[in-house]
Image: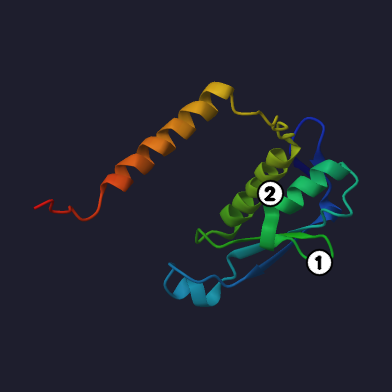
């Protein structure tokens, strides 16, 4: 069982862990021991997550979200299998916590009359400077 927040806990049946050999540091240990962790969370079927949280989680997950509604996290940072498991579970919890935050709605505002006027004055001034450029004619 994984406690995410006081309201959200993830049951063991929702999580599937598989282990494989990791790339990177570890010497001969890399070739022998399966230390990398692939954590699969059945997010779409989870009864503890609300529909809006699932939608935000899907957006946050990006490519890690599968077509059947699962979230897959891969961790092979350390040489220890147990530490990689902890990191994967922590990342999942952080991602779900992030998804529980409801984003503020943006309120569209109009530019003020003064700011419109200043912008147009700056444009005409710049146009006058550019108009002054060019060849100088001799009046002789």
User: Residue 1: image x %, image y %?
Assistant: 79, 45
Q: Residues within 10 Å of mark 1 (few under 14, many from 20)?
A: few
Whole-angstrom CA distance, mark 2 to mark 1, is 18 Å
Q: Is residue 49 visible?
A: no
Q: Which residue is mark 1?
A: 67
Mark linked to residue 92: 2
Residue 115 left/right relative to 16 = left
Q: How many marks?
A: 2
Contact, mark 2 vs mark 1 (Cβ under 8 Å) = no
Disc 2 versus disc 1: nearer the observer = 1
Please, is residue 116 above or below residue 1 in the view? Answer: above
Residue lying furthest bottom in this view? Answer: 31
Q: Residue at x 32, y 47 (%)?
A: 131
Q: Residue at x 48, y 34 (%)?
A: 120
Residue 45 left/right relative to 72 = right
Residue 95 left/right relative to 48 = left
Between 50 and 83, the one lying in front of the other is 50
Between 33 and 106, the one lying in front of the other is 106
Q: Secondary structure at mark 2?
A: helix
Q: Residues within 10 Å of mark 2 (few under 14, many from 20)?
A: many
Please, is residue 50 above or below residue 30 in the view? Answer: above
Mark linked to residue 10: none
Q: Residue at x 75, y 46 (%)?
A: 56
Q: Residue at x 44, y 31 (%)?
A: 121
């Amino acid at each position: 069982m994984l406690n995410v927040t006081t309201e959200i806990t993830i049951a063991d049946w929702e999580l599937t862990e598989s282990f494989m050999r990791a790339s990177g540091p570890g010497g001969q240990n890399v070739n022998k021991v399966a230390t990398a962790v692939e954590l699969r969370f059945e997010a779409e079927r989870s009864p503890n997550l609300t529909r809006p949280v699932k939608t935000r989680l899907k957006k946050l997950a990006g490519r890690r979200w599968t077509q059947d509604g699962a979230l897959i996290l891969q961790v092979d940072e350390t040489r220890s299998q147990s530490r990689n498991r902890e990191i994967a579970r922590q990342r999942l919890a952080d991602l779900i916590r992030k998804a529980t935050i409801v984003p503020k709605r943006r309120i569209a505002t109009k530019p003020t009359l003064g700011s419109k006027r200043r912008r147009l004055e700056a444009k005409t001034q710049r146009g006058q400077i550019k108009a002054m450029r060019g060849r100088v004619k001799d009046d002789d």
